[in-house]
Image (cartoon, rainbow, N blue to C red):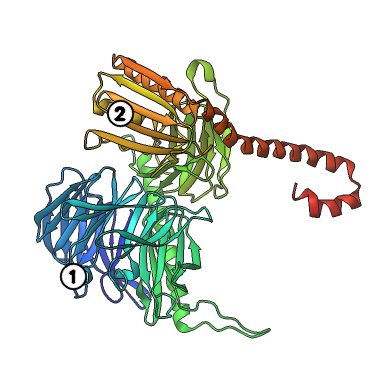
Amino acid sequence: MEPGLARVDYLQVVVGDQDGVVTCFGIKKGEAVPVFKTLPGQKIARLELGGALNTPQEKIFVAVGSEVKGFTKRGKQFLSFETNLTESIKAMHISGADLFLCASYIYNHYCDCKDQHYFLSGDKINDVLCLPVDKVKCITPVLACQDRVLRVLQGSDLLYEIEVPGPPTVLALSNGNGGDSGEEIVYGTSDGKLGLTQITGSKPVHKWEMGNEKKRGGILCLDSFDILGDGVKELLVGRDDGMIEIYAFESADEPVLRHDYALSESIASIQGGCVGKDGYDEILAATYSGWLTGLTTEPVHREGGSGEELKLSQEMQNKISSLRNELEHLQMKVLQEREKYQQSSQSSTAVSSVPAFSVNEKFTLNKDDASYSLTLEVQTAIDNVLVQSDVPIDLLDVDKNSAVVSFSSCDSEPNSNFLLATYRCQANTTRLELKVRSIEGQYGTLQAYVTPRIQPKTCQVHQYQIKPLSLHQRTHSIDQDRPMNTLTLKGQFSFAEIHSWVVFCLPEVPEKTPAGESITFYFQNTFLGTQLESTYRKGEGYFKSDNISTISILKDVLSKEATKRKINLNISYDVNEESVRHTLKLIHPKLEYQQLLAKKVHLIDALRDNLSVEDKKIYTIDHLRLV
């Protein structure tokens, strides 16, 4: 279950899950009291609250496949709107009678369920938002797109684009209402960055931007709520590594992290409100596997002096007793189900079925250390993960990873099998993060075999492409003053064909062929800092880079792809000799660092052997630890 989460009214919560069930419940005397629950169906992609403008938002809207359903707060269905989208809905926003829907590349605006506007995006759409109509006085949709751009629309036309530091995954109105002007939006990116920008009628105004200094996960959800009770709404952030953060606005410049809390699963949705007890606000978070977790402002710790007896209130005693009873009930239920399974598995007439489970996966390039992060999350505990690669890659250590890894010997020559490693997870581990580093020019497939702790034993295989220029990352612009080498391709190929070759070579390029007659993409090598400019159209392709190795790899791979399709290519080069010296200057600091590191490693052994015991005590503290 991957819930969507929202406040309906005081003390009520509504949740949508992967089984297609919408559940509404309230809390009375510490117990969850169901209000309504729908029948299972297709997976719920999005859940939003709506209603007439300037009235309580109490109507529940859910996106299921290409359909939008509406429910009252008592559970009565009042809307079943089948859209004209050919793909499943990925993002949804409600504003009064206006409905904003997005599939992978398509945006549609409906008013009273009638089609109004349409837009085809150049890259995948992750989220959609509309500025508050009561403040801005016009409909201004904003799309968060995978190519590190926020697209601001006017009707069916693109008004302008806003470049952001990472692929934006979620949008939210600043302060919950767009700020004083109604034009301010907060965005979160897949590499963990936060930012606020003002959407004016002519151009964007960047207010603040925060990096991901602590190397935490990507941002999945945002909300604004005054959880600290100081009269100013804080920014609530949920990340894919299970981190919940509270940012306070102590100055106008940028928010300050005041509190954080770590869960073991990714945060699918986050909301602030008063749910459990009168007078005490809470943060309610929904995780990928279906847990709803509440963080309360109610004091839960009591301190007493020496010898003083702490007495629990009757309410606390009842709560503890209720939790014990619930735990015992769950334990009995688990034992009964195990016995039932053992009996059925020993029966000669029983038929074993493969249990279905979904895997939440993410394979992204980290700019900071030029490595790929592979995150695997399952709704039940993971038993083991086997990683296999047909190209040379290195597995890097991950601090958050508590799994035990073991390597198996493999034959790289006949079978092209360069890596075989098994991660054995500890009990109740539902999320595993791995880090790998590839070598540019070596391309192939990385496979992960995920086996959860369920019976009968079942395994899912997930494949990830290691591309020829795997360490390149999309960027908005490059330094044109650098010495550049140029590769020119000409031949009888279509725009779609050369685009498919570029998709094969480089990461973060949309699979869909771009609109128009030509396209230009900019890339930066995350390891060396070199650059690449790619411009192509039907019959022509131009690739410029300050690294001649990049040009060489592109030439080899593109000529192989053209040969597969029996297309003759006319390939020409323009090599700038100065670029070699320039690239070596970029490599030199890294070589110096590695050389210094190797010297320090040798020094440690020599110091340990030659120093006396007393000298070791002094030297170890001040110098050896630094070495």
* Residue on which the image places disc 2: 500
Name the residue: 47% across, 74% down. Answer: 250
- Residue 177 figure quarter: bottom left
- Residue 121 figure quarter: top left
Label 2 element class = helix
User: Residue 94: x percent and y percent?
Assistant: 20, 62
Tell me, for residue 74, which label it has, or none.
1
Label 1 element class = loop
Residue 21 appears in the figure: no
Is 170 left, or right, of 74 in this rendering? right
For badge 2, the amino acid type reads Ser
User: Residue 57: x percent and y percent?
Assistant: 21, 71
User: Residue 551: x percent and y percent?
Assistant: 44, 26
**556 or 303, nearer to the observer:** 556
Tell me, for residue 345, which label it has, or none.
none
Q: Is residue 492 above or below residue 288?
A: above
Is 95 left, or right, of 272 in this rendering? left
**69 or 153, nearer to the observer:** 153
- Closer mark to the observer between disc 2 and disc 1: 2
User: Residue 130: x percent and y percent?
Assistant: 23, 61
- The 10 Å Cα crowd at callout 1, few under 14, some 14 to 19, many 20 or more, is few
For badge 1, the amino acid type reads Arg
Residue 10 appears in the figure: yes
Cα separation, mark 2 vs mark 1, equals 50 Å
Q: Are marks 2 and 1 in contact (CB under 8 Å)?
A: no
Q: What is the total number of numbered labels drawn onto the structure image?
A: 2
Q: Is residue 618 above or below residue 461?
A: below
Q: Is residue 306 above or below residue 93?
A: below
Q: Does label 2 or label 1 sit earlier along the sequence? A: 1
